[in-house]
Image (spheres, helix red, strand yellow):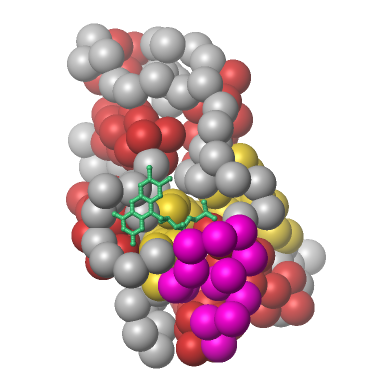
Amino acid sequence: MEKTLKAIAINGSPRHGGNTEMLLRKVLEPLAAAGWATDLLQVGGKPIRGCRACYHCFKTKNSRCSQGDAVFDECLEKMVAADAIILGSPTYFSDVSAEMKALIDRAGFVAIANGRLFRRKIGAAVVAVRRGGGTHAFDTMNHLFLISGAIIPGSIYWNLGFGLDKGAVNQDEEAMRNMIDLGQSIAWLGQAIRQNNDAGAPAVPAIS
Ligand SMILES: Cc1cc2nc3c(=O)[nH]c(=O)nc-3n(C[C@H](O)[C@H](O)[C@H](O)COP(=O)(O)O)c2cc1C
């Protein structure tokens, strides 16, 4: 039986139902329509600390962070299990939210310490922004994917949605088209990777 492809979207905004969440949900629409299992996780507004630089993940190599907090553990577990990871953040002072940065640093380190757990997964970033600094936040999230050996599909523009108040991004018609296109490209890429794997391409070796 064909394996169901999985996409996990992670919302770095503390504002439930806000602009970032709307963008993420829009990306997931074409994926769900294509038969993917989709999930949206909330990290914004939840207790998640930054990396402590203890380097335990490099010593234990047990695919876990030594801090052992439930918010991070759930995110990492779902990121590792997913075929596609979509990170979303509001723009805060031209960068991602603090919660999203904590997740990036810790998940990135654990993944690299354990043979590059995100290697050849699909990675995408989306950003809600009022006016300026959105591409910098976009770059911050893409850096996680790029250093991890993940594959980033492009879309019709930078993956930004404009708006200040909750829901304002819905008026950004171009952003919504962009999110749909992004979801479609992730679905296409996931299918292409699956066909490649089913055709007996050599397994991806772990990298230390
Ligand atoms: C602490 C803070 C810092 C912000 N910094 C910026 C900024 O640098 N540039 C900008 O255009 N918008 C900035 N904003 C506005 C948010 O990025 C914008 O309202 C976004 O749509 C919020 O997304 P959300 O509804 O998912 O929380 C900031 C908002 C907050 C609360």
Q: Quadrant of residue 110?
A: top left
Quarter of the rendering occupied by the C terminus? top left
Task: Using the image, determine if residue 174 lies above or below residue 161.
Answer: below
Task: Using the image, determine if residue 133 lies above or below residue 14.
Answer: below
x 34%, y 48%: residue: 92
Where does residue 112 sit, x and y in percent of width and height? Answer: 27, 36
> Which residue is situated farthest in the front direction here?
165
Q: Quadrant of residue 159?
A: bottom left
Where does residue 178 sit, x and y in percent of width and height? Answer: 48, 84
Report whether 44 appears left or right of 113: right
x 40%, y 11%: residue: 66
Where are the magenta residues, as a range? 161-173
Task: Using the image, determine if residue 186 lies above or below residue 11.
Answer: below
> Does residue 92 appear anywhere in the picture?
yes
Where does residue 205 sit, x and y in percent of width and height? Answer: 32, 49
Report whether 3 appears left or right of 131: right
Q: Which quadrant does ligand 1 occupy?
A: bottom left
> Does residue 24 appear anywhere in the picture?
no
Q: Is residue 172 magenta?
A: yes
Report whether 44 appears left or right of 49: right
x 40%, y 83%: residue: 155
x 72%, y 60%: residue: 37
Task: Using the image, determine if residue 205 lies above or below residue 73.
Answer: below
Foreground pick, 16 / 86: 16
Q: Quadrant of residue 52?
A: top left
Quarter of the rendering occupied by the N terminus? bottom right
Where does residue 77 sit, x and y in percent of width and height? Answer: 56, 34
Q: Is residue 175 magenta?
A: no
